[in-house]
Amino acid sequence: NMAASKRAIPHFTYVDEIDVTALEAMRADLNANRGGRPKLTMLPLMIVAICKTIPDFPMLNARYDDEAGVVTRHGAIHLGMAAQTDAGLTVPVIRDAQDRNVWQLATEITRLAEAARAGKLAPSEMGGGTITVTSLGPLGGIATTPVINRPEVAIIGPNKIVERPVFRSDGRGGDEVVRAKLMNLSISCDHRVVDGWDAASFVQGLKKYLETPVLLFAD
């Protein structure tokens, strides 16, 4: 499917840098107070941000029928998550991701990942996605150019978090150098369906939620 995707789809990729310092601090606080709930990785928080941003960019939550030349936009977000297994890459799908909170997403991510590694995913858990997230986690590089999971029209690729010195206002009219956690975020889109402006604007929307993470929990 990936080879066919590269042949059939005119891909383009947009990458921007996101400061996830506050998000990582919030994630640590949530994990410290999670009780019996699953430990949060970055992925469920990323999915919440995607679900909050997608309604303003419905062209991204879509599937394209090459033969018919028809684009179908979807209201529900059935989010694929690329998972590496001994049998190769699989893409289990989180159904109705927009209806799940961050803890429910974490639980479902764990369940699907374990089923994928065990080779026990049901066919219904592997098809019908409307947009996909792919991440190499700590192995991720500076930037990636993810391949779209056809017939979807967009795939999002968070990259490795790195610590770097950055300039910030010191609140007194000057600047100071502080340590920040930064992550490049990639998105690849089908140029037949999605314009570059829309892809860039979508990433800026994600950036708002990821850099001001309290918004993830605001209605």
Image (cartoon, rainbow, N blue to C red):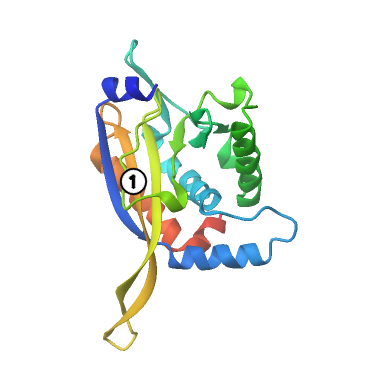
Instruction: Determine which quarter of the picture holds residue 183.
Output: bottom left
Q: Nearer the viewer, residue 85 or 147?
A: 85
| Residue 187 location (% of width, % of height) | 34, 42
Specify the farthest residue to the bottom: 172
Instruction: Determine which quarter of the picture holds residue 157.
Output: top left
| Residue 79 location (% of width, % of height) | 51, 35
Residue under the point 51% across and 36% down? 83
On the rendered structure, is 11 left or right of 58? left
Specify the farthest residue to the front: 86
Q: Is residue 192 above or below residue 172?
A: above
Classify the position of the C terminus by image quarter: bottom right
| Residue 175 location (% of width, % of height) | 27, 83
Q: Which element type, helix, strand or loop, lies under badge 1?
A: strand
Q: Is residue 30 above or below residue 117?
A: below
Residue under the point 57% across and 66% down? 28
On the rendered structure, is 170 left or right of 85? left
Residue under the point 45% across and 53% down? 138
Q: Is residue 81 in view from this perspective?
A: no
| Residue 195 location (% of width, % of height) | 25, 36
Classify the position of the N terminus by image quarter: top left
Q: Amino acid at mark 1?
A: Ser
Q: Nearer the viewer, residue 37 or 57?
A: 37
Q: Is residue 6 above or below residue 41?
A: above
Q: Is residue 62 above or below residue 31?
A: above
Residue where numbered disc 1 is placed: 186
Q: Is residue 42 in view from this perspective?
A: yes
Query: Pointer 1: residues within 10 angstroms few (<14), some, or many (20+)?
Result: many
Residue under the point 31% across and 89% down? 172
